[in-house]
Amino acid sequence: MHVAIAGAHGQVARLLTRLLARRGDEVTGLVRDPGHVEDVTADGARAVVLDLESASAAQVADAVRGADAVVFAAGAGPGSGAARKDTVDRAAAVLLAEAAQLAGVRDYLLLSSYGVDAVRDGASPEGLDEVFTAYLRAKLAAEEDLLQRAARGGLHVTVLRPGGLTDEPPTGRVDLDRSVERGSVPRADVAAVCAELLDAAASVPAGGRVLELVGGEEPLADAVARLAAHDGGAAG
């Protein structure tokens, strides 16, 4: 499998790259900062320097052409304002979808966030600051754009909404479903679930799927296989 990862220097993305590379998959890692090339290359990816806030869809398509799947793991990051939440967490995710379609890449895995439904229909949840609310709005808008593309038959879309991310050692056990209780999950388990979801992309139903993820008791490979069997049966 050949996977192109946008935001390849992010923590989950680097774990995913190493996992994929170890099992023999080819990885193209898109990074904005030339200073990140060495790290991404050491992880096992072919690094491509490309700023998703200024690149065209055609330029991104050239970078991902030949891949079997794309993963959006980029983010504006801590310390960024509301404006960059929109230009990265929404617009860059949409740009990657446009590029994937231009390049003939059908499978798209979006790393989103638990809690995005709290801002649906313009809601402004109490207790959330303006920037985090903007982040959730950007993630939700990206999800909606991608799922509309999936409904039109242009992409096979899986949206993954992890809970609170930790640096704890992986457990290999998760709670993964369309809706789960709020919780946290090690980044390494998120990366492992991503790899399993990429393997199960053929089971994605028309219209895409949205999954929430926190730590749990079910072996993660079993959790993905269970959902794949359900979705594959529904699609058939």
Image: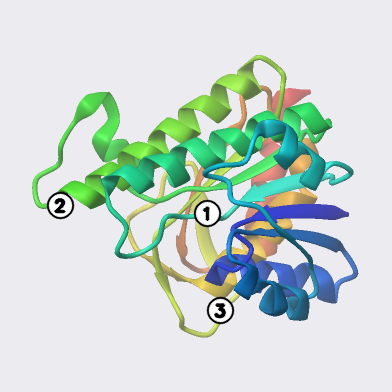
Q: CA distance from mark 3 to mark 1?
A: 14 Å
Q: Position of residue 112 (x, y in %)?
A: 47, 48
Residue 97 visible? The answer is yes
In the rendered image, which quarter is residue 95 located in?
top right
**Labels 3, 2: front one:** 2
Q: Cα distance, mark 3 to mark 2? A: 32 Å
Q: Please, is residue 13 above or below residue 4 in the view?
A: below
Secondary element at image label 3 = loop
Judging depth in this view, the residue of 211 and 2 nearest the camera is: 2
Relative image position of residue 123 (x, y in whole percent)? 18, 31
Residue assigned mark 3: 171
Asked if 102 appears above or below 30 in the picture, the reply is above
Could you say which is closer to the camera, residue 216 or residue 51? Answer: 51
Give the residue displayed 29% in from the left and 64% down from the top.
79
Label at residue 176:
1
Measuring from the top left, give residue 171's x and y in whole percent: 56, 79
Nearest to the eye among marks 1 and 2: give it: 2
The three-letter amino acid code for the residue at tag 3 is Thr
Identify the residue shown where x is 34% and y is 54%.
181
What amino acid does circle 2 point to?
Answer: Asp
For the point 39% across and 36% down, which residue is it?
140
Badge 2: few (under 14), some or many (20 or more) residues near its Cα, within 10 Å?
A: few
Residue extending farthest to the left is 126
Residue 203's place in the image compared with 64, above or below, is above
Side of 174 where 201 appears, left or right: right
Q: Earlier in the sequence, mark 3 or mark 1?
A: 3
Disc 1 secondary structure class: strand
Q: Which residue is mark 2?
A: 129
Element at badge 2? loop
Count residues near mark 3 (Cα–Cα under 10 Å), then give few for <14, some for 14-19, many for 20+: some
Q: Earlier in the sequence, mark 3 or mark 2?
A: 2
